[in-house]
Amino acid sequence: MIWQERWQRSLMNNYGTPPLLIVRGTGSRVWDDTGKEYLDMIAGIAVNAVGHAHPAVVKAVSDQLSTLGHTSNLVATKEPIELAERLLALLRAPGDARVFFCNSGTEANEAAFKLGRLTNRVHVVVAQGSFHGRTIGALSWTAQPAKQDPFRPLPGEVTVVPFGDADALAAAVRATTAAVVLEPIQGEGGVIVPPVGYLRRAREICDTHGALLMLDEVQTGIGRTGEWFDFQREAITPDVVMLAKGLGGGFPIGACIAYGRAASFFGPGSHGSTFGGNPVACAAALAVLKVIEEGDLVTRAATLHEVLATGLVARGNGLVTSVRGRGLLLAAVLGSDRGPELESAAREHGILVNAVLPNAIRLAPALTITDTDIADLLGRWDLATAQVVR
Ligand code: PMP
């Protein structure tokens, strides 16, 4: 039996049958079961921040697993303390900020959802096209009808406003608003960058009404957009930040960081996670942060944006009209809805990308992508786009 049949007979169909069986990876390259090599330009959907099988992460995880793999939160371990301190320093958070660890992006948002409830207000404002996760709380913030409708009723009182429109946000927030929840750049929504100053306006609007500003940095965080956290370019202080994806470099981990009054909303018993703060996951994250810092990969992510943006258009054979995004979170925008076709042509030519919209191809490569990887990518991109326009 070939693997697709086994997949279909054993796994739920919520992803559809995948086109590839990947068996190993190193850096920005992965190989399938037939030995074919691919440049992994989606990197686990913005997860493999330091590439596949980075020696420092492999060592950190192996050392930790052979020392202490798991305890539960009935006792403390050193790794989550060290990681929380490190994240608070990178966030340049005030001394009153605190971290809650979980295992995924949706759980980070779920923790934020519960913090919101502890304001004793239930109204939340989110942006059209947002993505905050698939569990029921986070799904109520994911303003995409196709994903929400089968699961209604969803909790809460949620107002949806156009993304990037600060006036619409100002009109929606009121004295009973618990939180405004925003991605600094909408990832799943199609790599949509809001106008400069949007988050700063959001901060002011929240302050006017005593609402919490919650920023979902699950996809944008950990250096990807050329800042450690994308909101830092607007020099604001949020109330809550949600992290996951790149933080563990491929090891499952999420974090919800709260500042000020929100940092003390959870007391003993209000929330928890058996695996949250697992020492192996925290060791992986500490290794990822160290690799990024020592390689100055945040600066490199910022620098490489222009190289990729220019190359993807120049080698796009007229199919690519522009590139949007920041740092190493990019979308190649097509003049037509041939994204799915280009995604599969790219795969044929040894590139893994994702048609995030019918007319946009998302790239979110590892921050460790090399100049050789980029040269190979652009050569293959030329062939793939030529095949689609032919
Ligand atoms: N928030 C954002 C901004 C995301 O991009 C995602 C995942 N695409 C999530 C939350 C959910 O993360 P997870 O799949 O780890 O639950």
Image: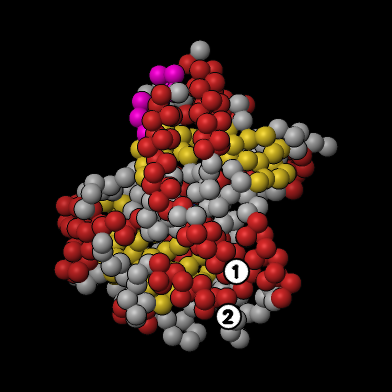
Which residue is at the far right? 1
Write down the quadrant of residue 331 in the picture. top left
Write down the quadrant of residue 323 in the picture. top left
Residue 34 visible in rendering: yes
Compared with 383, 242 (above or below) is below
What amino acid does circle 2 point to? Lys
**Inter-mark Cα distance, 1 to 2:** 10 Å
> Mark 1: is the Cβ under 8 angstroms from ligand 1?
no
What residue sits right under mark 2 in the picture?
A: 78
Residue at screen point 54% across, 21% down: 383
Task: Specify the color scheme.
Answer: secondary structure
Compared with 258, 59 (above or below) is above
Q: Is residue 149 left or right of residue 280?
A: left
> Mark 2: is the Cβ under 8 angstroms from ligand 1?
no
Q: Secondary structure at mark 1?
A: helix
Q: Judge by depth and name the residue closer to the eye, 227 or 73.
A: 227
- Label 2: few (<14), some (14–19) or many (≥20) C-alpha neighbours in 10 Å: few
* Residue 73, image x, y percentages: 59, 81
What residue sits right under mark 1 in the picture?
A: 283
Q: Judge by depth and name the residue closer to the eye, 114 or 53.
A: 53
Compared with 211, 77 (above or below) is below
Q: Secondary structure at mark 2?
A: helix
Q: Is residue 109 left or right of residue 16?
A: left
